[in-house]
Amino acid sequence: MQYLDRVRLISDDYEQYGLHRGDEGHILNAEIRYGKFCFYREDPVTKFDDDGVSVRIEDLELVEASGSSDEAILEDLPLHNPEWGCKVIDGFIYNLKGERLNEYAYDYHHRRIK
């Protein structure tokens, strides 16, 4: 998962923000902060929700990859800093310098129990 990818919410933990399991949207920020992407839900009328919501990586699944190149992502980052751009590959977070940022891969199959 990375910037501009179409993703689906797979958790009920965001209902207080008006988001529900199965909602689809896009990642419209190239950064990962505190293990979260900024998720923008699609709205049939306005196309996107006005406010993005920080959603844990493990609570999103990829629907359609955007195909954005690292160069295009880097161009959209403040100061074009490759340490800020992030993508998730096989559960690992990588910055645009190719550095892996988490020790253990996210486990999408074992959901937290409330």
Image (spheres, helix red, strand yellow):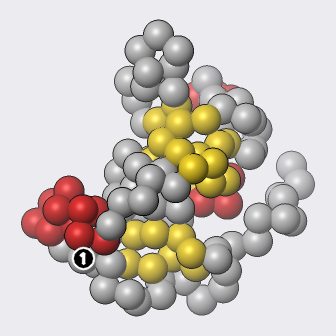
Give the percent coordinates (x, y) of residue 23.
Answer: 66, 32
Kind of residue indicated by mark 1: Pro
What residue is drawn where x is 65% and y is 43%? Answer: 8
In this view, which residue lies farthest toward the left? 79
Q: Is residue 20 above or below residue 27?
A: above
Q: Is residue 89 above or below residue 60?
A: below
In the displayed structure, does residue 75 sit left or right of residue 90?
left
Front position in the image: 13 or 74 = 74
- The residue beneath circle 1 is 82
Tell me which corner region of the image, top left, top right, bottom left or bottom right, holds residue 89.
Answer: bottom right
Front position in the image: 114 or 76 = 76
In this view, which residue lies farthest toward the top? 45
In the displayed structure, does residue 38 sit left or right of residue 35?
left
What residue is drawn where x is 61% and y is 24%? Answer: 18
On the question of residue 28 being in view, the answer is yes
What residue is drawn where x is 75% and y is 44%? Answer: 11
Give the percent coordinates (x, y) of residue 78.
Answer: 15, 60
Front position in the image: 53 or 97 = 97
Q: Secondary structure at mark 1?
A: loop
Front position in the image: 35 or 77 = 77
Neighbourhood count class around disc 1 (C-alpha, 10 Å): few under 14, some 14–19, many 20 upward? some
On the question of residue 77 being in view, the answer is no
What residue is drawn where x is 23% and y is 70%? Answer: 71
Give the percent coordinates (x, y) of residue 49.
Answer: 44, 24
Give the percent coordinates (x, y) of residue 96.
Answer: 33, 78
Q: Is residue 104 above or below residue 1?
A: below
Tell me which corner region of the image, top left, top right, bottom left or bottom right, holds residue 28.
Answer: top left
Tell me which corner region of the image, top left, top right, bottom left or bottom right, holds residue 111.
Answer: bottom right
In the displayed structure, does residue 54 sit left or right of residue 9?
left
